[in-house]
Image (tube, helix red, strand yellow):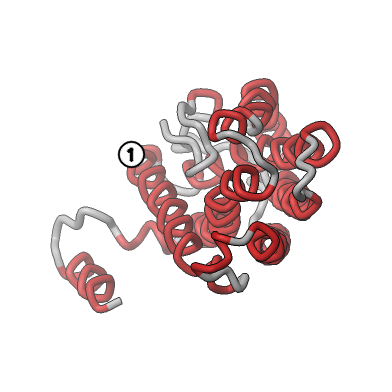
Amino acid sequence: MLLLAAFVAWEHRTPAPMLPLNLFASAQFSSANVVTFVVYAALGGVLFLLPIELQQVSGYSALEAGISLLPVTLIMLALSARSGDLAARIGPRLQMTAGPLLIAAGLALFTRIDSGGNYVTEVLPAVLVFGAGLAANVAPLTSTVLEAVPASHAGMASAVNNDVARAAGLIAVAVLPAAAGLTGESYLHPELFSAGFGRACLISAGLCVLGGLLAAATIRNPRAPGPEAAPAAGGLIHCALDAPASR
């Protein structure tokens, strides 16, 4: 915290800051980054614990645990561009509200995973809902961040948003297991780990609900694109499981 405070103080005083603090004067930019922090904290924590749950509790191999999430990538490839186009037409607020709520539903469905580990009945429904929520949320979130600043600062805005997402994920990986009651002993006993994983999923689902409510309360649909608006989300390149899309 001291280093962060020192960085902010230095950036405020230097004539050529690496991160112009006036970016955060935009309520839309600041709000979108708060939503990013909350939602990606939830994603980072559960995506860290899910492969362990599948391997330790459900008996999946490491390869099977990885492949089980492949539908998320396919859903995002199929729907993210369409989600970005829809947000460009109607504004991002609806999708940034509904997307985290869908993600929350998917995370809640992950609590159904147990020692049986049936992929079709236990894992796949959660993966499909989770992927749909990501597809609904990521492109509008990214375009909102970019369009909230002048085009000349779009790259910087994207970098800030990615840093916020990654920081949220790192904090969640450190904090969520303890918050869910997962101790070192839990990793040696599948039944203890499964109970803690369920609590972690519900905590993360709650964070996503909070993210959706924050978006509903703070994100505003622009009336019309201005001449300085950043390009739409169609040119984004990045798998958004660990962070929003980058340009």
Quadrant where the C terminus is found in the figure:
top left
Q: Secondary structure at mark 1?
A: helix
Answer above or below: position of 67 versus 173: above
* Residue found at the very far front of the displayed protein: 189
The quarter of the displayed image where residue 5 is located: bottom left
Work out whether residue 85 can be spotted: no
Work out whether residue 232 can be spotted: yes
**Residue 196 horizontal/vertical position (percent):** 66, 65
Q: In the figure, is residue 95 to the left or right of 238?
A: right
Q: In the figure, is residue 45 to the left or right of 71?
A: left
Q: Nearer the viewer, residue 194 or 3?
A: 194
**Residue 100 horizontal/vertical position (percent):** 70, 51
The structure residue drawn at horizontal position 33% and vertical position 39%, both measured from the top left corner, is 152
The quarter of the displayed image where residue 65 is located: top right
Q: Nearer the viewer, residue 168 or 67?
A: 67
Q: In the figure, is residue 99 to the left or right of 112?
A: left
The structure residue drawn at horizontal position 53% and vertical position 51%, both measured from the top left corner, is 48
**Residue 44 horizontal/vertical position (percent):** 53, 52
Q: Nearer the viewer, residue 140 or 54?
A: 54
The quarter of the displayed image where residue 135 is located: top right
| Tally of numbered discs | 1
The structure residue drawn at horizontal position 36% and vertical position 45%, both measured from the top left corner, is 159
**Residue 97 horizontal/vertical position (percent):** 73, 52
The structure residue drawn at horizontal position 76% and vertical position 55%, both measured from the top left corner, is 111
Q: In the figure, is residue 58 to the left or right of 154?
A: right
Quadrant where the N terminus is found in the figure:
bottom left
Badge 1 crowding class, 10 Å Cα cut-off, few under 14, some 14 to 19, many 20 or more, is few
Answer above or below: position of 71 versus 200: above
Q: Nearer the viewer, residue 32 or 38?
A: 38
* Amino acid type indicated by mark 1: Ser
Q: Which residue is mark 1?
A: 152
